Structure formats: C-alpha cells, structure tokens
Amino acid sequence: MDNYYGPGRNHLFVPGPVNIPEQVLRAMNRNNEDYRSPAIPAMTKVLLEDVKKIFKTITGTPFLIPTTGTGAWESALTNTLSPGDRIVSFLIGQFSLLWIDQMQRLNFNVDVIESDWGTGANLEVLGSKLAADTGHTIKAICIVHNETATGVTNNLAAVRKLLDHYQHPALFLVDGVSSICALDFRMDEWGVDVALTGSQKALSLPTGMGIVCASPKALEASKTSKSVRVFFDWKDYLKFYNMGTFWPYTPSIQLLYGLREALDLLFEEGLDNVIERHTRLAKATRLAVEAWGLKNCTQKEEWFSDTVTAVVVPSYIDSSEIVRRGWKRYNLSLGLGLNKVAGKVFRIGHLGNLNELQLLGCLAGVEMILKDVGYPVKLGSGVAAACAFLQNSIPMIPSRI
Amino acid sequence: MDNYYGPGRNHLFVPGPVNIPEQVLRAMNRNNEDYRSPAIPAMTKVLLEDVKKIFKTITGTPFLIPTTGTGAWESALTNTLSPGDRIVSFLIGQFSLLWIDQMQRLNFNVDVIESDWGTGANLEVLGSKLAADTGHTIKAICIVHNETATGVTNNLAAVRKLLDHYQHPALFLVDGVSSICALDFRMDEWGVDVALTGSQKALSLPTGMGIVCASPKALEASKTSKSVRVFFDWKDYLKFYNMGTFWPYTPSIQLLYGLREALDLLFEEGLDNVIERHTRLAKATRLAVEAWGLKNCTQKEEWFSDTVTAVVVPSYIDSSEIVRRGWKRYNLSLGLGLNKVAGKVFRIGHLGNLNELQLLGCLAGVEMILKDVGYPVKLGSGVAAACAFLQNSIPMIPSRI
Amino acid sequence: MDNYYGPGRNHLFVPGPVNIPEQVLRAMNRNNEDYRSPAIPAMTKVLLEDVKKIFKTITGTPFLIPTTGTGAWESALTNTLSPGDRIVSFLIGQFSLLWIDQMQRLNFNVDVIESDWGTGANLEVLGSKLAADTGHTIKAICIVHNETATGVTNNLAAVRKLLDHYQHPALFLVDGVSSICALDFRMDEWGVDVALTGSQKALSLPTGMGIVCASPKALEASKTSKSVRVFFDWKDYLKFYNMGTFWPYTPSIQLLYGLREALDLLFEEGLDNVIERHTRLAKATRLAVEAWGLKNCTQKEEWFSDTVTAVVVPSYIDSSEIVRRGWKRYNLSLGLGLNKVAGKVFRIGHLGNLNELQLLGCLAGVEMILKDVGYPVKLGSGVAAACAFLQNSIPMIPSRI
Amino acid sequence: MDNYYGPGRNHLFVPGPVNIPEQVLRAMNRNNEDYRSPAIPAMTKVLLEDVKKIFKTITGTPFLIPTTGTGAWESALTNTLSPGDRIVSFLIGQFSLLWIDQMQRLNFNVDVIESDWGTGANLEVLGSKLAADTGHTIKAICIVHNETATGVTNNLAAVRKLLDHYQHPALFLVDGVSSICALDFRMDEWGVDVALTGSQKALSLPTGMGIVCASPKALEASKTSKSVRVFFDWKDYLKFYNMGTFWPYTPSIQLLYGLREALDLLFEEGLDNVIERHTRLAKATRLAVEAWGLKNCTQKEEWFSDTVTAVVVPSYIDSSEIVRRGWKRYNLSLGLGLNKVAGKVFRIGHLGNLNELQLLGCLAGVEMILKDVGYPVKLGSGVAAACAFLQNSIPMIPSRI
C-alpha cells in the first residue's frame, strides 16, 4: 500500500523523471546477472553503437555512466579541461546556474554570459568574446541546449557557426539532458565535442544512467586534462572497451536492458518522428497557454522549448500552490518554478514516451487548477485550442494502419 | 517489441477489461506457489471474508472461480436451478441476451421480458407475472444489474420490492459484472440470492476470476438442484472450505495476490467513495455527450449507467469507424456497438481504477475522432462541460491533504 | 511484506503449479488491453497455430479456455459425449479418480478399470473389453497420460494399437495435464481425439488457461453430443474463430502474452530437447531415491514418470511431516501424498522450466529432511548418484557455446 | 527472447551483483514519480533513519548516492581528506588495490602496507606506523573490510584498538561493500568514520546506489577538506537534508522503493539472523571445499570471509575454465580469479538474499564442473559435508513455525 494513494494513474508532467513505458518496465523486471559473463559485454557493444544514433554521431565515443545528469556534467568537464581553464558559459536559468556553479567549484575559470531568465544564450556576447580571444584563452564553450527551468532552447548551430567563423578551437560542450531524444540534436553536424543526457529524461528510463558522448577532439583533450578524476574518468572506460569487457565497475543490469528496450522503441517510432511528436505536443501546450490568457516564460518564439513549457502566472497567484493542488486533488504532477522564478511559473513537462491524449488530460487538469486558485480561466479553452491543432496534425500510428 | 506499438500509454476505455493499477501489477508479479502450503489457505480465508464486503453481505458465501463472467453465470444458474425450471429474465441488450441464451441452452424454461435496447427491465410486466404466479412456478428472476451494451442500470431494489409485495419465493439472481465495486449494490438489503462479477471489471484485475456470492437460500437450493455440473459445482468448494484447504483445484496464485491488493485499494479509498467516484466520472461523461449534441443510448435518466455510456451517433456515421480511428490514431480504446446497436453506438467505459484526468484525456480524444469522421463537434465543448462539473465536485485525495 | 517470509528463493517442487521463468513473468507484467482490437485476434491466430506444435498435431483444433485442468476435462467430455454414453477409464491414482468422478457426475456410464496405485493402466483388461464390444457400445477411452499422484506414465501408443487392432471407433481422450510439453506426446501419430493440459504445468505459466485440442473426429462428435454445456462449448469458440475475432468471452490478456513467451522459450530450446531434459532430471531423481534406499511408488520401470516421482517412505514415517518440514525449515515445497497414499509418499515434481542445479538443491534438501524425520539416510548419497549421471549427460547450453 | 537463453534459473554465485528477491523486484516494478512531491522526501527521511541500522550507528549521517562502490569510495575520500594527505592503506587483493589506485590518482599520499594475497591486513605494521607517527601525519586509515577478490575479512575492531592505543586521531575509513548487511559490522562501537557499501551486494538490490555513512568527526573533516568535488560532495546533500527536500539531484525512484523493501526484509529476518545465515552458508561452503580436497585462498581461519570463498585450483587447471564451464553448461555464474590470482582461483559468492538449498545447488554444480575439467573430485562429497553441518544448524523459518 502506498502512503499517498490516490485512485487511477498519476499524471506525471514534471520535466523529468518522466513516464516509463510499460515495455521498458517489463524489460527491467529482472534479476541481477554476472556482468562479466559473455552476455553483458555482447549487449553493451551493440548498445554503445546504437546509443550513438541518438546523438547523431558517427565519430563519437559514448560512455554509459552509473550516475545522474550532475555526474555527467562533471564527467564532461573534468575529462576535457584542466583547473584554471577559461570556460565561456551562459546563465539563463536554474540548470545553467547549477552547471556554472559546478564549473566554479571544479576550479575552472568561468566567463559567465548572463541573460534574463526566459531568454536564450546571448550569442552576440559570445561572438565578441570569441572575436577578442585571438590568443585562444577560451578552452571551452559550455551551453545547456534546453534550459529546463524556463523552457528555453538554445541555438546550437549558431554557436558552431560562431566558432567556425572565428576559427576558434574551443571545445563545444553541451548539456542535452532535456533535449536529446526529444529535440533536434546533431552532434557531428554541429561539431559538438561533448554531449550528455540522463536516462530519466526523453529516454524514459529510471534515473541512474548518465550518457556522455565525446568527439575525437574531446577524447584527445582527455589525454592531457589535468583535472583530478577517477570515477568519472573516461580512461578507465576506454581501457575496458579495448579489453572487450566494457565495464570498469558494476553497471546496472536492469538499466542496460531498459536502455535496450528504450532504444528499440525510439527506433521503431523513428527518431525523427519522435522529435516531431515532441514539436506537436509542445505546440499544443503553447496554444493552450495562450488560450488561457497566460504567458510563456520564454520570451521569444525562437527559444520555445519543445520539451517543457514554463507558464507565468499572474502576480496574485503563487505558482507553487498550483503544483501542490495538482498533486493533492488531481493526481497531477507539475513542475515547480525554481529559484528566480519560484512562485512565478509552473512547468508542464511534455517529453519522453507520451502521447496527445495524455497531454490533453493534463491540460484539462491545469484548467481546473487555475480555476481552483482563482484565475478566471474559461474551462475547456486550452483543450479546445490544443485539439484544434492536434486534430489536424496527429499522424496515424504506422503499426496500426 | 509489441507488433502494434504506438508511443505513450494506451487509453483503455472499453467497459472491461479495464486499467490495472500499478499496485496490482506489482502484487501479481510473482512466481507460482504451492497452493497446499499453509500460506494460501490462510490468505484465502481472509480474502473470502473481505470479498463479502464488496457485495455488502454478511450472510453470503463467496466463491472465487477460475473462470470468466460467462462461467460465473453458469455457476449461478446450475447450482440453484434444475432443468425445466421457469426463469423470468429481461432482454434489454447484448449481455442480457447472452445470459438468456445460456439459460436456454442449459434447458431452463426462460420467460423473457423484452424491452427496447436503451431501456431498463420492464418491471411492470414482472409485476404482472408475479401477481399471476400464485402457484410459484417462477423459480428465479435473473437480471443484469448493469447492461454493458447499452449503459442501462436496472433498479434492483424495485425488483426486491415486487418479490416482497407478492410474497414470491423466487430466487433473485443478479449479474453484477459491470456494477459490483462501482455502482451501489446491496446483496443483503435487496435480498439478492446470487450475485456475481468478473475480476477484469470494476475490481481492475486481469480476466480470470469469476466471483460469485450465494445467499443462504441459494446455498439451500444448491443442495437439491438437478442441473448437471462439476467444475462449477459449489459443493466441491464448500467441502474444501470445511477442510480448511479451500481449493478443489488449482487457483491462480497471481490473481489471489492481485485480489488482495485490489481489495486493499478499494478499502483504502472506501467503497462508498469508489462508488461516488464512478458517479462523478459518469456524470462528467454524460455532460460531455450532451455538449457534443449527441444522444445517450439510455433513454431515461433513471437508467443511466455510472460505469459505461453508450453514445448514439448520427445515422450518417458508422460508430465502428469511431472505435477503429481511436485505436489507429489516438491510442484510445473505445467500446464497439454490439448486435442491434452495432454501427449505431460507441461506448465509453468509465469504471475501475480510473481518475478524472484520465477520463478527460479520453473525452478530448473522442472529440477529435468525432471531427475526424465528419461530425460537426465544437472541439473542447465536451471537456469544458465535464470540467465545469468536475472542478466543483472532485474531492481532495485524503492521503495527500 | 509476505506473511510467511523466509530468506532466499522458494524451492518449488510440487508437480504444479511450477516455476515461472522470469521471461514469462516479464511478458505478463502488463496492463489489460481491449481484446476486440486487431492486436489480440492477430496474436491469437498465431498462438493457435503454434500451440498445435506442443500436441504434435497438424489436424487438431486447439481451444484456450479460461479455466483449469478440471474445466478442461469437462470440456473434453461434454463436447464429445452424450449422457449415458459408455466410457472406459482407468483408476490408478487421485487424478484419474477425480476425472472418473467427474464423468459419473456428468452422467456418463463409466466402465472403470481399476489397478493398484503405483501401477499403470491395465491394458489387458482394456483389450478384453474392446474385443468383447463388437457392438461398439464403448464411446470413449479416457486415460490420464501421467498420473500425477503416483508418478505413473501410461503407454498411449499401446492404447491406440489396441483400438486399431480391434478396429474400434471409440474416441480416445487423454488428460495430458502433467505430460504435455514434458513427456513425449504425439496427438496425430497416436490418434488421440482430445488432448488437454493446464497452463501451470509444463508450460510454466500461472494457473488459468485450460488448453484443449480436438481431432477432426472429436469436432465431428461435438456436433451431435447431447451433453448440456455453454461455457465449455467448443461451438462458441468455432463461431468466433470463423469470424476472426476468436474470443466468445474475455480472455486473460496477460496469459496470452505469457503463453506467447512460454512457447517461444520451448521452441528456442527445442521441444525434443525439453523432453530430453525432463527425462534427464527424472532419471537423476530416481537415482537419488535409490541411493537413499527408498522406493519409487511406481512399481515398474515402464511406468516411471519423467515429470513427477512419488517416493515411498518407511511405515514409521509420516510423509506429510516431510512436506511440512520442507516448507518450515528449508523453504522447499514438495508434493503431499494424496488419498490412498496420503502419509505414505511424498512427491518431487520435476517438470517445467527447471534445470539440473535447481533439482540438486531440492535433492540435497530432501536428504536433510529425511535425516530430520529419523530416516537413516547417508547425507550426500542421493546428490552423488544424481551428479554421477548428470555430469555425463547434461548438454552444453546451445546459445552459449 | 534472451540471446543466451538456457532453461531454468540462472544460479548467480558471483560475489555481486547478487540475487534480487522477488519482493524487491516487485517493489521496483513502477513508473517514475516526481521526486519533489511530499511523498519522496517523507519516504527518504525514514529510509535515512533505517539505513543507519545496517551500519549499527546512532550518530552517523548516511548518504544515498546514485553511483557504484567506486563512486562511494571517492565520496568517502574527497569529503574527508585534502590532496597530499597521508593515508595508510592495505594492499591485499584486487579491490584494495583499486581503492589505493584511486587514492593515488586523487593525489593523496598513500602509505601502502602490502601483504600476500590471501592474507589479511598486516596490523603489526600498522601498529609500528602509528607508534612512529607522533606528529600525526597520518590523516586516515583506509581498509577494505572484506576483500572480495580473495575472501579475506579484516579485523576492524583490532584496527580501532590500535588507533585508541596510540591515541591516534586518524580518520578510520572502511570499504564495507561486501560486508555490510552480511558480516558483523559496528560503526559506532568500532569508531568507524566513514563506512560505505553498494546496493548490489548484501542488500540484494540492483547496482546504482552507493550508501555512505559518515561519523560526526568525518562530517567535521568535510568542512575543511580541500579535495575538489561536486557530484560527490556531502555538503549539497546536507543542504537539502536541512531544507527537508533531501535530494540535490534526481534519485532513482525505483531504487528508493527497492531499498525500502530490502530493509523491510532484513528487519523482518533480523539483522543478527541475517549475519548468522551468512556465517552458516560460508561455513558450509568451506566444508565442501575441504571435502573436495581443495584449498581456500584465505590462509588463516581468522580471515575467512563469510560472504565469498576463493577456491584455489591445482596448477594444472585454469580456474577461468571452471567459470566458463559453469555458465556454458550449468547456468551457474561463479566469480573469476582477478589479477594476481587470475586462473588460480575461482570464487563462490554466498551473500545477500540466499538460502541453503540455493547454495547446495551451486556446490553440486561446482563438483560436476571440477570433474569436467579433470579434477578427481568425489561427486557428492562437498554437498555431503555441507549438509552434515547445515542439517544441524539451519533454524526453522520463524514465520512458518
């Protein structure tokens, strides 16, 4: 018996951890195994090849690390940079803030480009810095692809363009935690040097696997990086890759089988279709928000996130009360506003293994909550706007035609 | 990999089998056990006591039979009646039809009171028959509490009133397949002699357990019934109840643990609250149907079913196409129209372990399907009507206050 | 928390229900589905074809009935025979006894050939009866292939030979509950008219599916059989087979997916290899019993069962105490002696998805129990005898070579 | 379908990851949840209290880190020590070697006391060093409680005695990966400053949770430690403990529920009974090894490990072949010999949620493998020796008396 039981399904719309599909739960419902038997290395070998597809890389080297996104960040930084190295990074919300905090505590020299929460990375300033940096003191550009706190997606292609324009050799490190497998992401095309995500986001697995992918240039950098590291050291992984046993320490057998199934589901749907589904769900959400007469925390359309929407509430409402009420009355889990936007926004996560009717149930729930807390919403208005769009754009399920 | 994979959850809104809560799936995720060990009888003993609560009976004797609702029907009839016995029964839809067909094939003499599909049992005719039957040739009244094909709930208290009024000793046998644990049902108060349900309905379990409850009068009748039976014979169960081993043949270990958990969830929520939740979900559904400008197949409010709503579509639409489209495009499973109402109605099951936001997702889906098939629905209208009601009536989740 | 918790795995060695492999548990760990969607009929169609392979039949028609072995018996009898029909059957143990009891209660005229418990069906007497029955009053020969209570396997080929020798047209009905998928069984070659098993036996599923297979002759007989039946009536199944929807009433979605996986595992191993594995495990068990200085309840080698061994204990020991002690001290579940052999034998089930080391753990446990209850066993003797044989005969696991 | 399918259960006897009990698999079979809802903090609060019991500490502060044992090591070191700090550690096998390697790579000054593999930590040398260290340059003693590679258990009480004798203030850091929840461990009584384990060992969970417990003195040290750390920094945890939200980053919901169940099972059995069961299983294993005429890698009885036994094979046998054969022929997973003892020993893990009959199945399997590879073992001899001891010492299962 759960202590907080409520009838029916929990409607999980935080931007991670997200809903795990039944297929993945099934795949993970298993006893431990000896990870030194031939079975696990054989499986791992194929997984490593397949996982490259979600990064859209041919030349990258992936690492499946028993950690979270925070650990994946640390792995990306400490393997490629040395203490004191100058990093340019962007502060646009809670997760970019936390990454920058990590960089500072790891003794990097972080050159922070700050923008208002709700706006994207200021690439103009980046351009100036790159232009000025003829001595190549900037060792890395670190950027959060999708800032989960504000629902802002940065333009990675534009960052690459700038780097190329200034022929700047800085490493390009990307936090793809709430983007990879959901938003368009092209590691090789965009010349990303390290990309990373966490299992509990668009991959729709439990938390516990940090997935990091390194370009050849990043691997090269790891050979000379002076950052102290052991658990997160790629060298140990590479040594075991070469030996064909793949694991420097014990992996989660269950997450490996879960990842296998999660990738199978992604490939069955088609990665591009998955991304398109995220676009569709996000558009529907934004139409609903508009119909409710509320504002998107994201200030320009070019930054709209297709995995999470941060909704600004009127000043007379505490957005935390919306989240609390969702849980207490509707079995609906929404994302809180964090730090600077605490109390001001609530967030709807629309990423992972999710479909339109699930989202519409959530939107209907949000409408009732808004009414509960005194906002004069017209009930049904958001759902109507979302449906008007969705009814024209949802494709048939290919396996069922 | 499923052959008919579509992303996200399947929205299961057929009126059975219904959604299984995760708690129950967990409870059933187990190896077989020796059913002759002390553990299974001890568990069964408590289950039999607890299962009486869902029938609201103190004096009844329950049987947990490894079968379906069809088998439970057969068990009810063959244990209490003898070939040739006169039964009065009501034909008002596909499931009452099938039960009557079974009665006839089992060689009972069925006196059928037929009504239009969409109406309830004609109790006036029943009254006349009882009045006329001074010789007590009628051995049983068999009635489907809730006709799943048309969404019609019959008034059992009124049947009992008639029987009492005419001091008629006929047995009172009730199919509660789509009512028990969801609609108000009072075995002892209404003098029901046999009541039955199936595990895959409001109990929210997998199919495979027919739950039959017999009054003392029914048990008495079983001693002299001449109907040929073995598998469904209560006598074997009673013998093993007396021995304390409880099982004349192998039960499903998984369904026993599943039933334990399902009952725990029901009792945690409170059976009356569960019934109220069904009333609320049904009302919301009917308000949506009304807002869409469509008709309920059920012709009078007194018969409205709180577990399933059969929606009549305009004659230019084939309701089967609605169901097909739900599955093919929206991962939504709706109920087909059956037999006389095939092509004319589709059904929304709203029973079992289900909450409001799940239902609202379904209703939003139905709106889009209606538009798909050419019905001029105003998108959002049904959801709006449902939300207007629900936002005023959903209680807080007690465990979360 | 289980009420009867003991650390480690339960060692399940009753002759059913048996251990469910993790693969099957996984396959069954799922929500309900609409059984009228295209997915379930498509799956059922393939299952029905594949299930014929476990009966070794090309011409048979299988039925997957939501019931137990007892229900499968009833289905076999009532579909092919009419009340008063003369059946020849063999009483050699508890399960043949129960089937005969069912036949009698179903009003057949049972001509019982009784033998000592521990011996096989007396085919000489059958021969005489067939010889004498020039008028073909015998409508069916009903035989339990493997009597689970005594560990006796009957010779079905010999029964067929007799029927052919006397050119007798009697139907040949076989209870294969503890044989099919474990012992050599050849429906077509042996001219079996109805064969049946239960899901919880060698198929290694939960209880709840009775699997019945009918020859064309049996199907023909079902058209004229006058036995009253509805739930078990093949006619309803055949009608839905023809419609392509396959199910006259709701099947267990979970058991269908479980059956799919169970068959996949059987076919992956190879049905003949599965049978050979059962032969090997049984031989090892018998060698252990011999080493302990105990007797097999089965009196001649020709009847030795490869799915269950009933071990006779000295008269100064109560075999029930052995079973109780197994459960209370060793987390080992053994089979009780039933009816005539209650207290005199205990049974080791060695059927289903089981391997040699599991069995050896059980045998070691039995040795300790024997010592516990005062039998002067030489500890290790049975395991040694079993290992001596197994070490020479276990094949490599093909997928791992 | 698994690619390396073999019938029956895999017999998992590597010293981690170990068998997960079905109860824990059930508890973990669940969707993700919002970890910021009131439910997860409430659960975590109790878990943190309960987890202290497995360390036998009142004053300690536990951390449940999403990592493996290797990460837990890093957490223990970097939170309490500063680069250049002198550590005394013991090299007695592969896992102590790896920890020392980590210490060196983390830039600590490691004073290694090396002993033969198969012997315990040389405490005499430790004594001399402590005696000589009047200036207290030694900042920490790091010791592996149970060296998993050789099956050697070190005497922690003796280490504490030495520290006390010399009134030495060095921190006392203990790797309890293959000891805690299985061997006698007393954090407070022995004055351990940091103790740690991994979820996949005696707790019998999947891999993925590093459990670290810090004494007040260790916490104090963490305030001044200059080691660079973010992911493993206790400070972040302590901050969130104070806020009552408990998690600085996303935990694995499934592992939290799994830990809850694992602790419940441990407490139900009783931690002291669990330890006694490990003693019993280990003794039985050693008796078998002796009966086979083989040597324990552990050179003195005082160091015998009760969680893993490393068995030395004759020089003409390659122990890796034993492990390979176990997997290929018997579905038995044994531990390889690592590094210095590669090819020379194989290991039997006997820790976690395991019972006697499981172990006896393993021992029987080892006997057959030994014969397979040409060692003249007397089949049954090891099992006989083990049974002779076990039959006298296994207690009744309390819940079943």
Image: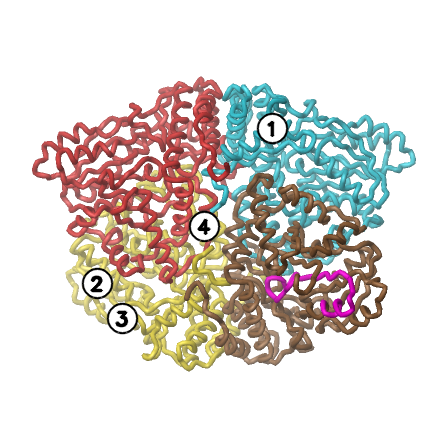
Chain colours: A yellow, B brown, C cyan, D red
Q: What crowding class fits label 4: few (fewer than 14 Cα within 10 Å), some (14-19), or many (20 or more)? A: many
Give left or right: position of C188 versus B363.
right
Q: Is D349 placed above or below D263 here?
A: above
**In front here: D4 or B233?**
B233
Q: Main secondary structure of the magenta part?
A: loop
Residue that protrudes farthest toward the left in the picture: D135
Q: Local crowd at mark 3 within 10 Å, few (<14), some, or many (≥20)?
A: few
Discs 2/3, front: 3
Name which residue lies at 36% across and 56% down: A198
Residue highlighted by disc 3: A340
Q: Is residue A360 above or below residue B83?
A: below
Give coordinates of residue C3: x percent, y percent.
50, 44
Q: Which mark is nearer the camera, 1 or 3?
A: 1
Residue position marked by numbered label 2 in the rendering: A88
Label 3 sits on what residue type?
A: Lys
Q: Of helix, strand and loop, which one carries label 2?
A: strand
Q: Position of residue B131 (x, y in %)?
A: 82, 70
